[in-house]
Image: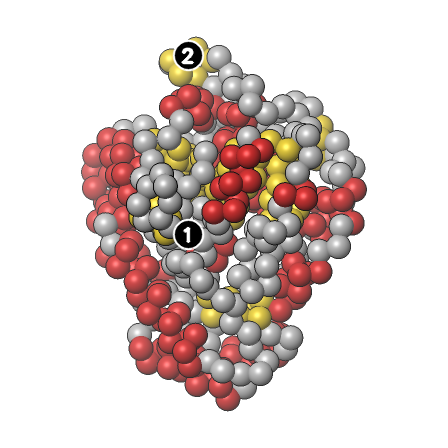
């Protein structure tokens, strides 16, 4: 059993690529315009701007804020310590300083009890990462951003279709909003393995901020808003028509696919009771891009499952603060011509014991819509017999 069967998942959507090939139009066309419109409506934002990939989406958000005068070099961005490295690269590539905050071991999301103590006069934003497809937003995080005048950036690379239930208040009645529409702006990745995955690389930015959307679009098109006129130092980061057409076709089935992931996850949560396996809590919506378990015997468990024909993954074996790239004295940014100074000492040496435990113990189980009930039962039985 594969950890993720992309061939089976993608087979129904091959026609979308063929239609683009027949059209003869491959960039900045109707397919991209249509997907941007549909995805913005799905997420619940006014604007969606397609780009080359998820890292570019986040990087362009911060670059746009710098161009708009909202941020400047050396400003700080609070970010969860346990995340994929792209979340942090988007910050460092803009010569901004990441301030790492530990997660809650029970939810694996940034611990909102620790955020406020990390704020300094140079803090300009908080980035939350909806890691594993779990909603990371809390009312407390929103309140912190409002009280301190901070931008809230969402890394929604792993949580397409996830929702946050907004409780009743004096301002509104209870309702839900999708991740990607909870903050000032959000970056989305459509890497093939994602819940909404392309047939290659693609990404997008969603926001209600018209100026930000226009700036992101310009920066992703060489810094040009009008052909051959360049008002900004930009880059080439555009979604191609094939990926846009495929994503638009798959978007119609996203909620159904996510529901199947939730059904599989519910079985794991209900059936897997083992002293060496911890299933983190999920008290908010989760679309289960990844189903993570924690085990002090992670490597032995993974080998056991592999020997019995079940593929697994580790997300991620080395936490960002222990990566070699962040121990070098300088890091060159492709968006700028200046070298980045050494990251703050706290980035390298703050104790991040919870993050390190997660990265040492995390194992991802198969959880995708191509799985049968028999596949799920096989995984459960193997876990129980370990």
Mark 1 and mark 2 residues within 8 Å of each other at the beta carbon: no
Labels 1 and 2: the sequence-earlier one: 1
Q: Residue furthest bottom?
A: 385
Residue 130: image x %, image y %? 48, 51
Residue 3: image x %, image y %? 44, 68
For the residue pair 279 and 1, the one nearer the viewer reads as: 279
For the residue pair 157 and 76, the one nearer the viewer reads as: 76
> Is 157 on the left or on the right of 126, as rendered?
left
Q: Which residue is mark 2?
A: 228
Question: Tag 2, which secondary structure?
Answer: loop
For the residue pair 268 and 297, the one nearer the viewer reads as: 268
Residue 255, quarter of picture: bottom left
> Is 354 on the left or on the right of 210, as rendered?
right
Question: Tag 1, which secondary structure?
Answer: loop
Quarter of the image where the N terminus is located: bottom left
Q: Is residue 315 above or below residue 378?
A: above
> Is 304 on the left or on the right of 352, as rendered?
left
Tag nearer the camera, 1 or 2: 1
Residue at image point 35% right, 48% down = 168
Residue 342, quarter of picture: top right
Q: Is residue 125 above or below residue 323?
A: above
Q: Which residue is mark 1?
A: 159
């Amino acid at each position: 059993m594969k950890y993720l069967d992309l061939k089976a998942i993608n087979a129904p959507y091959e026609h979308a690529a063929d239609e683009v090939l027949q059209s003869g139009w491959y960039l900045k066309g109707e397919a991209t315009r249509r997907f941007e419109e549909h995805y913005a409506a799905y997420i619940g934002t006014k604007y969606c701007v397609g780009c080359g990939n998820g890292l570019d989406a986040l990087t362009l958000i911060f670059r746009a804020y710098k161009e708009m005068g909202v941020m400047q070099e050396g400003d700080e961005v609070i970010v969860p310590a346990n995340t994929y490295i792209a979340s942090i690269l988007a910050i460092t590539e803009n010569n901004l300083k990441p301030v790492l905050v530990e997660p809650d071991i029970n939810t694996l999301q940034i611990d909102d009890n620790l955020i406020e103590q990390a704020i300094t006069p140079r803090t300009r934003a908080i980035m939350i990462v909806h890691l594993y497809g779990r909603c990371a937003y809390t009312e407390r995080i929103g309140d912190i951003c409002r009280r301190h005048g901070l931008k809230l950036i969402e890394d929604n690379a792993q949580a397409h279709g996830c929702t946050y239930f907004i409780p009743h208040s004096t301002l509104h009645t209870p309702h839900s909003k999708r991740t990607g529409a909870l903050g000032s702006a959000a970056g989305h990745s459509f890497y093939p393995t994602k819940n909404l995955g392309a047939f290659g690389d693609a990404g997008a930015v969603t926001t209600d901020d018209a100026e930000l959307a226009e700036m992101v679009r310009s920066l992703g098109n060489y810094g040009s808003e009008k052909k051959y006129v360049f008002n900004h130092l930009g880059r080439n980061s555009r979604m191609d028509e094939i990926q846009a057409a495929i994503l638009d076709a798959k978007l119609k089935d996203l909620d159904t696919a996510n529901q199947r992931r939730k059904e599989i996850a519910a079985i794991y949560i209900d059936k897997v009771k083992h002293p060496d396996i911890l299933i983190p809590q999920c008290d908010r919506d989760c679309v289960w891009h990844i189903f993570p378990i924690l085990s002090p015997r992670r490597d032995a468990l993974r080998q056991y499952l592999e020997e019995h024909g079940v593929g697994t993954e580790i997300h991620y074996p080395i936490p960002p603060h222990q990566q070699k790239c962040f121990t070098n004295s300088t890091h060159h940014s492709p968006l700028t011509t200046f070298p980045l100074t050494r990251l703050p000492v706290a980035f390298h040496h703050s104790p991040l014991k919870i993050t390190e435990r997660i990265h040492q113990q995390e194992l991802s189980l198969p959880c995708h819509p191509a799985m049968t009930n028999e596949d799920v039962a096989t995984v459960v039985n193997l876990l129980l017999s370990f």
